[in-house]
Image (cartoon, grey):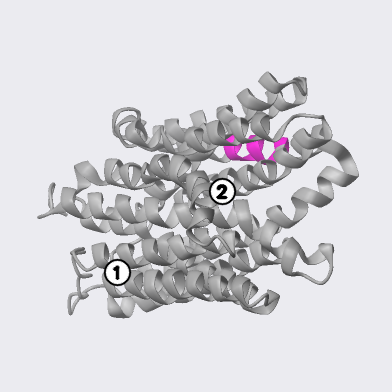
Amino acid sequence: MADHLPGERRNVALLAANQALYLIAAITVMTLSGVVGQQLAQTPALATLPVAMMQVGALVSTFPASMLMRRIGRRAGFLIGSIGGGMLGAAVATVGIIADSFALFCLGNLLLGVYQAFAMYYRFAAADCAGESFRSIAISLVMAGGVIAAFLGPWNASFSQSLMTNQPLAGPYVMLTGLALVAGILLTLLRVPPSREPEPDAPAQRTLPQIMMQPAFLVALTAATVGYAMMIMIMTATPIAMQHSGFSMLQIATVMQWHVLGMFAPSFVTGWLISRYGVLNILLAGGLLLVGALGTALSGESFSHYLMALLLLGVAWNFLFVGGTTLLTETHTVEERGKVQGINDLIIFSMVALSSLLAGVLLHQIAWQGLNLSALPFALLTLAVTSALALQRRRVAAS
């Protein structure tokens, strides 16, 4: 591939902007949809069902979204996600609140999950748009769009309630409808290079089992899955655990904001770090940061312990997820990328959905300390498989 592709920086800027717009929607759902669900549901036990519906929507759409974009292209697929998923989903959720319909509100959140499924491929589109030397930086810059969302997401969830004085909780979803439309407009300016057609004498594509048995694929998948699933599990449990410990909502919000900043702020340098030190070293650093986060959480339950643990957890997620995404691009050809990226994200978000459901159960059964301790073997597994691949590559280079 050429060292630089035409318009790569403009395309990456557009993708980063769309990443921020999507994450504002995701943060709004995580903040408000449970509150709205509690008001609309017939039983409090179903209060968080709308939040779960977003994860279900993402889960069932992830692989089809990848295969669809393989046929119709990235831009067309992203437009389907932002308009058909984001804009329509936010509008349906708004109607659900106004009509006092729990079913409609759940449907709106399900469609917002479709938006999430397509948006998760922004980072892969950045790799498609960038030349070899800019690829890891492009992926990390797109992920850096989350820094903006870390501030605007909570702002939308609170201040946009003034948009509809008679139905204040509908206001943030009205705002999401407009932001998804803005995302669609920006996406019309995106120019992702088309996939190359296979040469007449090109070898046949490998099967998924053949691709997935590559050591690099297994490490990429393990790192991204562990980083994302453990982060979601602990992040979901943190507000409940802090509330049980007697902390105020302001203190909880402060910890969560620093956590989100830890997730996305490093993206400004993660790509450079990967280029400078190598992707495996960054994955090892991410694994060590995850162990550090868990160790901090296990060492105490003061405000500073929660703050430092969640900050380290965010940075660990960034290194593992961005690093895993970068390593994954080394395991497939252009022709194979649709199915490989699709199965990668299907597995990741299956585990993410499962871990989010397990967070409350584990916190109730084995408490905060036990929950963090249960994540430790997965962090050690990530360090082990990454170290094994690094050692294998050193032996190959030496021979």
- Magenta segment boundaries in residue numbering: 376-384
Q: Given the current orientation, which residue lies at the most extreme left position? A: 6
Give the residue type that dot 1 points to: Arg
Determine which residue is flagged by label 2: 222
Residue 112 visible, this angle: yes
Residue at 21% x, 47% y: name it. Answer: 132
The residue carrying pointer 2 sits among few (fewer than 14), some (14 to 19) or many (20 or more) residues within 10 Å by Cα, namely many
Residue 15 placement (x, y as % from top left): 29, 55
Along the viewing direction, whichever of 363 and 182 lies nearer the viewer:
182
The residue carrying pointer 1 sits among few (fewer than 14), some (14 to 19) or many (20 or more) residues within 10 Å by Cα, namely many
In the rendered image of this protein, does residue 13 appear above or below residue 337?
A: above
Residue at 56% x, 48% y: name it. Answer: 222
Indicate left or right for 16 with 355 as reference.
left
Indicate left or right for 63 with 184 as reference.
right
Q: Nearer the viewer, mark 1 or mark 2?
A: 1
In the rendered image of this protein, does residue 134 appear above or below residue 122?
A: above
Along the viewing direction, whichever of 344 and 53 lies nearer the viewer:
53
Give the residue type that dot 2 points to: Thr
Along the viewing direction, whichever of 319 and 380 lies nearer the viewer:
319
Secondary structure under tag 2 reads: helix
Task: Name the magenta segment's main secondary structure.
Answer: helix
Quarter containing the N terminus: bottom left
Query: In the rendered structure, which disc, 1 or 2, sits on the residue that comes first in sequence?
Result: 1
Give the quarter of the image for residue 288.
top right
In magenta segment, residue 333: no
Residue 60 visible, this angle: no
Asked whether disc 1 touches disc 2, contact meaning CB atoms under 8 Å apart, the reply is no
Determine which residue is flagged by label 1: 74
Residue 253 - label: none
Secondary structure under tag 1 reads: helix
Indicate left or right for 277 with 94 as reference.
left
Spatial CA span between label 1 and label 2: 26 Å
